[in-house]
Image (spheres, grey):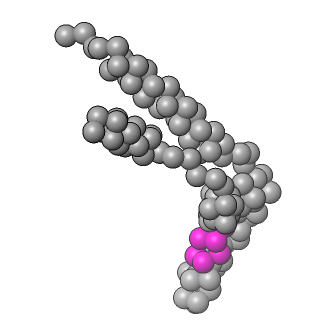
Amino acid sequence: MPLSEQEQRLLDEMERSLYHHDADDVAKVGTRGRASYTAIALGIIAGVIGLVLLIVGVVVRQPLVGVAGFAVMFVGALLAFAPPRRLTVPRDARDAAPRRQSFMDTLGERFEQRRDGED
């Protein structure tokens, strides 16, 4: 069964809106940025130092040295794999941005306008 003109226009508008909103979302989320090679290098160095401390703690039978080595390895891994902080958007900046109406709000308003026009 073919769509009526009104249904076809509504479908086209929904499609345009979907493409528009998807492009905005990809622009926001898709930009991860470049890796911080300094942080990766420091993380690797900390991991190696932590591994050496862990092995030394096992060899000399000092659990505190081993635990400290594990902690240093863990911090090194966090440093190496964490995303760069300078690329994150502060919550205040996101809240200050003007909010657009969602697609469903727009459809709801149009429905209400049509329903009010029928009365």
Q: How many numbered marks does the figure carry?
A: 0
Location of the C terminus (image quadrant): top left
Give me the residue at 38% from left, 39% from top.
113
Tell me where residue 70 sits by quadrant. bottom right
Which residues are drawn in magenta? 70-77
Q: Main secondary structure of the magenta part?
A: helix
Could you say which is closer to the camera, residue 28 or residue 51? 28
**Image check: 62 left or right of 48?**
left
Residue 83, visible in the rendered structure: no
Image x and y of residue 37, in percent: 77, 52
In the rendered image, the vertical position of residue 51 relative to residue 22, given as above or below:
below
Q: Is residue 74 magenta?
A: yes
Give me the residue at 56% from left, 83% from top.
67
Q: Is residue 106 magenta?
A: no
Residue 86, visible in the rendered structure: yes
Could you say which is closer to the camera, residue 74 or residue 105? 105
Image x and y of residue 52, in percent: 66, 72
Image x and y of residue 96, in percent: 67, 61
**Image check: 42 left or right of 72?**
right
Image x and y of residue 13, in percent: 45, 25
**Image check: 33 left or right of 5?**
right
Give me the residue at 19% from left, 10% from top.
1
Give me the residue at 49% from left, 31% from top.
17
Q: Residue furthest top?
A: 2
